[in-house]
Amino acid sequence: MSKGMNYEETLSWLYTQLPLFSRIGAAAYKADLDNTIAICSFLDNPQHKSKSIHVAGTNGKGSTSHMLAAILQQSGYKTGLYTSPHLKDFRERIKINGEMISKAFVVDFTAKTKSLSETIQPSFFELTVGMAFDYFAQEQVDIAIIETGLGGRLDSTNVINPLVSVITNIGYDHMNLLGNTLEQIASEKAGIIKKDTPVVIGEWLPETRQIFLDKAAEMNAPVHFAADEYEILDVRYSATKLDLKIADRKEIMNEQYELDLNGLYQANNLCTVLCTIDVLLDKGFEFDIDDMQSALKNVKSLTGLHGRWEVLKQNPTLIIDVAHNEDGIRSVLKNLQQLNIAPANTHFVMGMVNDKDVNKVLTLLPAAATYYFCNAHIPRAMPYEELQRKAAQHGLKGNGYDDVNEAIKAALGKAKPDDTIMVCGSVFVVGEVNSNLF
């Protein structure tokens, strides 16, 4: 890395020199916190200079993090948000009040940590977590929402002492790293529960509830199960929003919300968010219901969140969703079913990565739908020919395309006006969709 690199050269260095999970998968995952601790120590431990909220979970953690960020910034708090991966621009990962980190900060941070990087060889994720902590500390945010990358216990983000820990749900994902049973995966996620720190559990399963209770008891952490404290009374869907009626069981009252994230699965995430806001109220934060309602109507514009049941076009309906694991795909299928969209009227544009349990996902998909197989342009992507072959073994047939946009064009050419085209299977495939083309 030569002196005085510009932003493009810096980004290229980050991508090529550091092991990157989105490119190479498990080989980039470091099963300890040593590098992160070394980076934070070098930076004078910026992770302890900001208040924070820690968010883990198999699915829903991105949406939950962005909803929380929208509410906090709408309520007048300077709010940091760290999420991953990004869809289009690396700087999406690190934002304050919806604004991406400056290119100059990325360049300067990479230069100042270069000698350390060459010594300890951190992963891309480890270094970018350090970058986020450093940025939030320097900008003196009031609060930072920190989303885990993988798991929880050994995730690079797990060096913070948050005001509240949030675990959205547990499902099967990254089993090669986190374990093959829901109990094992829940144990890894429960690793973000800290001593004397409240934890909010979004959705729980009979096999995971006790794991959370045991870990919380061990850490003397007050535990809140969002589904026990909030109840979804009514959900109404449209192509642009969800109208929700949610009851607060503690206050015996209910409230109407309009949410611009319109996947039906967001109702559960909203209960998790509301439960987390209750914890923050106990910690001295102040929220006004009008601000909260305004924030939830405008999550996308306030935070820049995309790719969650995002309707790009109608007649035929074109939807992109970053669902990429068994639970995520189940949610997508349930959403289609609840909207009475028949498999025969559904066109799936699908691409996946090599380390996902592809066969499990394929067994869920309906044979009556039409398929268009594609791949993202990253080394970890499963070539569309291989996905097509595996899908055929499950009775799913369709043509293959090297580019998601070509696949979408083909689907648009074949779909009838009242059909639905569903693009899913990989964050990276969704990231390569060029919405200007459609």
Image: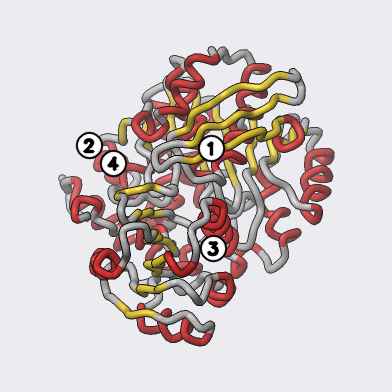
Q: Position of residue 296 (x, y in %)?
A: 47, 28
Q: Quick one: label 4, few (<14), some, or many (20+) residues within 10 Å? A: many
Name the residue located 47 percent from the left edge and 85 percent from the top edge. Answer: 392
Name the residue located 69 percent from the left edge and 45 percent from the top edge. Answer: 203
Q: Is residue 373 left or right of residue 33?
A: left
Numbered tag placed on residue 236 in the rendering: 1
Can you identify the residue that label 2 sits on?
A: 104
Label whose residue precedes the other's in the sequence (3 or 2): 2
Q: Amino acid at mark 3?
A: Asn
Viewport quadrant of the C terminus: bottom left
Numbered tag placed on residue 106 in the rendering: 4
SS under mark 2: helix
Q: Quick one: label 3, few (<14), some, or many (20+) residues within 10 Å? A: many
* Label 4, label 3: how far apart the Cα atoms are: 31 Å
Q: Nearer the viewer, residue 154 or 312?
A: 312
* Label 2, label 4: how far apart the Cα atoms are: 5 Å
* Label 1, label 4: how far apart the Cα atoms are: 42 Å
- C-beta proximity under 8 Å, tags 2 and 4: yes
Q: Amino acid at mark 2?
A: Ala
Q: Nearer the viewer, residue 179 or 76?
A: 76
Q: Is residue 85 left or right of residue 30?
A: left
Can you identify the residue that label 3 sits on?
A: 325
Q: Quadrant of residue 348?
A: bottom left
SS under mark 3: loop
Numbered tag placed on residue 200 in the rendering: none
Q: Amino acid at mark 1?
A: Arg
Which of pointers 3 and 2 indicates the residue nearer the eye? 3
Which of pointers 1 and 4 indicates the residue nearer the eye? 1
- C-beta proximity under 8 Å, tags 1 and 2: no
- C-beta proximity under 8 Å, tags 3 and 1: no
Q: Position of residue 28 (x, y in %)?
A: 46, 64
Q: Amino acid at mark 4?
A: Val
